[in-house]
Image (spheres, helix red, strand yellow):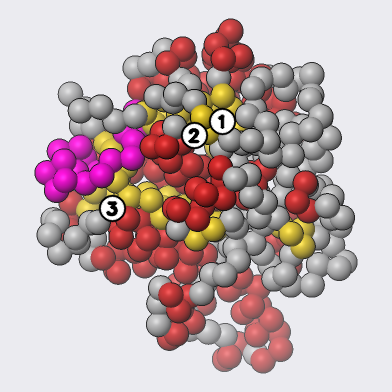
Amino acid sequence: MKRRVVITGLGAITPIGIGKTEFWQGLIAGKNGIDRVQSFDVSEFPTQIGAEVKNFDPAMFFDKKESRRMDRFGQFALAAAKLAVEDAELDVKKIDKTRAGVSVGSGIGGIQTIQEQIEVLKTKGPRRVSPFLVPMLIANIASGYISIEFGFQGPNATIVTACATGTHSIGEAFNMIRAGMADVMVAGGAEAAFVPIAFAGFCSMRAMSTRNDDPARASRPFDAQRDGFVMGEGAGVVILEELGHALKRGARIYAEVAGYGLSGDAYHITAPDPEGKGAALCMSMALQDAQMTPEEVDYINAHGTSTPLNDKIETMAIKQVFGEHAYKLAISSTKSMIGHLLGAAGSVEAIACALTLAHQVIPPTINYENPDPECDLNYVPNKAQKRKIKVALSNSFGFGGTNATLILKQFVE
């Protein structure tokens, strides 16, 4: 019999709030986290808006010397992990650290450091390049920081699967606990890519919204007038525990992780399969893993990027998997409020699902104003909905055709 896995701690660094409470209050209020980009001069860029994390002070989490040796994505990751461990009331001195591990990934890693140090190389020469360049930029440094901070010696891994990173990271940590490799896992994703080179790359792809004159209404998943995603940044980290381990220490349980699916489109480097076969397979695999029927799912936190292709094809895939039940589902995209957090998106959305189950309130899809005939499901438009939710599903899809789905359910002993 597979070991059961529950979520006992949540740590969120997001454009609408730091910590689970601020994040959740922002979500259910339909708060907008998108504005003109402040990280650098965007005046020559076709897209000039984004969802940046506001009021993040590294001094709240690290000393000045430590924070200078960390890329912003690493700061986000470790800060979110500290928040999650604190939220779980996990006394790291009392657990077996060889049975505690970390699975925190990033789609891009320390690109801010790369951008800065290339300038140093060009203007001051190779001797002035930071000796911390390599450890600051590698994606697995996030898991490394967290492992070192808490002394966790169990599985230590990093997943890099573009915008599916956060979901894959939680899913693989879930599997590690089920397989008996660990009793506790710190899992999630972090991203901080607001630098000119990354932003220019997305602009050149014409993937981002150019609604620069109205940033608050730019991210509009499933709306007929959507014109691209809005880039965000942040981190989401959860504490996963084997059920017996959590019960023994009297932990509060937000939700149980019930199933995990992953698939590949095998179609195109950036565009989704036009028939939605990869996304449908991924959701079906998660349902099979959870030993659930489609009718048992109440809510889907959609990938919902606000791009013309994604939203149409995700809707198509949901209909393939859920049939008539698709029209009874509540579906929302929290990216309408926080933008697309790239490698952190799936883990922050998993936190949203856990809180939805805990509070029995569904976050809205804001900016839903113009129905699209090809997107004709219940997207929880504009206002949060109170509704009985026993099972929540979260989708993440990434460049390269990589797909990931998590299923969470209300915990029942």
- Which range is magenta? 241-258
**For the residue labelled by badge 2, is the local secondary structure a helix, a strand or a loop?**
strand
Look at the image and tell me in which quarter the N terminus lies. Answer: top left
- Which one is earlier in the sequence, the residue at label 2 or at label 1? 2
306 relative to 34, above or below: above
Three-letter amino acid code at the position of disc 2: Val
- The spot of residue 67 in percent (x, y) is 46, 79
- Which one is earlier in the sequence, the residue at label 3 or at label 2? 3
Which residue appears at 61% of the width and 14% of the height?
327
Name the residue that disc number 3 marks: 88
262 relative to 247, above or below: above
The numbered disc on residue 361 is: 2
Which residue appears at 58% of the width and 73% of the height?
113
How far apart marks 2 and 1 lie (CA) works out to: 6 Å
Nearest-to-viewer mark from 3 and 2: 2
Q: Is residue 266 visible?
A: no
Q: Which residue occupies the foreground of this view, 144 or 64?
A: 64
Q: Please tell me whether residue 61 belongs to the stretch shown in magenta.
A: no
How far apart marks 3 and 1 lie (CA) works out to: 27 Å
Three-letter amino acid code at the position of disc 3: Ala
